[in-house]
Amino acid sequence: MRWKRLFSCGLIGILALVGVGCKDEDTLESKVKQTTPIIRTINGERYEFKGNRVTQLSSDEDDIAKYGVISDAHGEVEKARAFAKKFIEIGVDGIILPGDLANNETLRYGHRDSKQDKEEIKEILEVVAETGLPVFVIPGNHERKPDYESALKEVTKKYHNVIDMTKFRVFDGDDADFISLPGYQVFKIPGRQFIPDNGYWANPRFIRETGILRKGLDDAVVLISHGAGYSNTDRKLGPATIYSGRDVGDKTTTEIMKQNDIPFAIAGHIHEAGGYAATYDGKPVKQKEWAEQFSVNFGTLERWKNLNGQTYNGMAGVLTIKGKKAKYEMFYIK
């Protein structure tokens, strides 16, 4: 990160600052709409919250960043707690949750939820936030807006280290930068609805506008998305490969990554593809292998049969960025 960036603000952020009042009981997300930025210290590092952007003010001498990733938690609180503890031991800089914190049995199975989705979202966030690390979160295709928004409002009042990336779409970090794509790219197909009527749909226009957020970032940029882009991995193994061997990734997402120089993406959603990564053109990228570009699927905390034939009781992983390259590593509960 360079100090000159601390004095810059994107057009979107500027527009968001105009004519907005603030009350004492307002959340941080409300306060940052004012012209005066909010400065917070999280895990010993200073961050500025302003407009739609979070900027890390403090920096170190190296060019390495390491982030734990837990995708598709689906209410598995104790597994989330175990992986959060693992990330502390590894020494990550933060934790990313790319959606589907809730189970939403109504959407999945057509019957009443055994536990309220809002409570599942809160519990997952709380056990991860207890680490004290910065926590970056987006909704996936299972979250309803009222549940997600209410849960985030309550959690962020207690845990100032939780960063809702539906509001703060850009993270300008020391050694890595993030932009977020909240929600999921497919609303419904014949015979199947993927997103609740009051959920988060990343439609093509929204996806294309997301690419603009990359402007002005000078470190390696990572797209935080629930669903992976299309990686041309039909009949091969990639982050959006389903059991039939078909790549169901989103082509518009890949297009905006290419057009806006966004080399890396983390995702989940396709549980069976957990632990697989590929480049735009379908070249597989193995774990612990440094590469200049890839999208990777971090799987799910649920019990699920993987494309490799193994059944795992949950998985999560770590993304490491060094300069313009990155690598990933998975951890499994067998």
Image: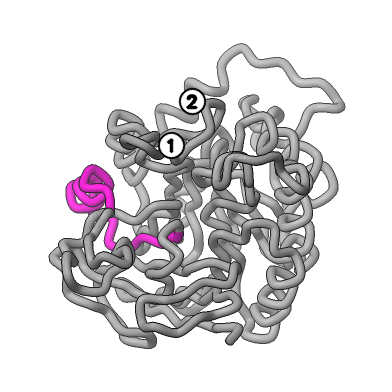
Q: Which residue is mark 1?
A: 193
Q: Earlier in the sequence, mark 2 or mark 1?
A: 2
Left or right relative to 26: residue 189: left
Q: At x 50% / y 64%, what residue is drawn?
A: 174
Q: Was residue 258 drawn as part of the magenta stretch in this picture?
A: yes
SS at badge 1: strand
Q: Residue 295, image x and y in percent?
A: 32, 65
Mark 2–mark 1 distance (CA, rounded to whole Å):
36 Å
Q: Residues within 10 Å of mark 1 (few under 14, many from 20)?
A: some
Vertical position of residue 154 compared to residue 163: above or below: above
Residue furthest to the top in view is 19
**Residue type marked 1:** Gln
**Residue type marked 2:** Ile
Q: Quadrant of the C terminus?
A: bottom right
Q: At x 51% / y 46%, what residue is drawn?
A: 140
Q: Residue 63, image x and y in percent?
A: 43, 76
Q: At x 80% / y 64%, what residue is drawn?
A: 130
Vertical position of residue 132 compared to residue 206: above or below: below
Q: Residue 162, image x and y in percent?
A: 69, 52
Look at discs 2 and 1 and give the one toward the viewer. Answer: 1
Of 137 and 242, nearer the camera is 242
Q: Was residue 257 drawn as part of the magenta stretch in this picture?
A: yes
Q: Residue 233, image x and y in percent?
A: 18, 66
Magenta region, residue range: 249-268
Q: Which residue is mark 2?
A: 14
**CB atoms of marks 2 and 1 within 8 Å:** no
Left or right relative to 258: residue 20: right
Residue 316, numbered circle: none
SS at badge 2: helix
Q: At x 39% / y 59%, what residue is drawn?
A: 222
Question: Picture quarter containing residue 264?
Answer: bottom left
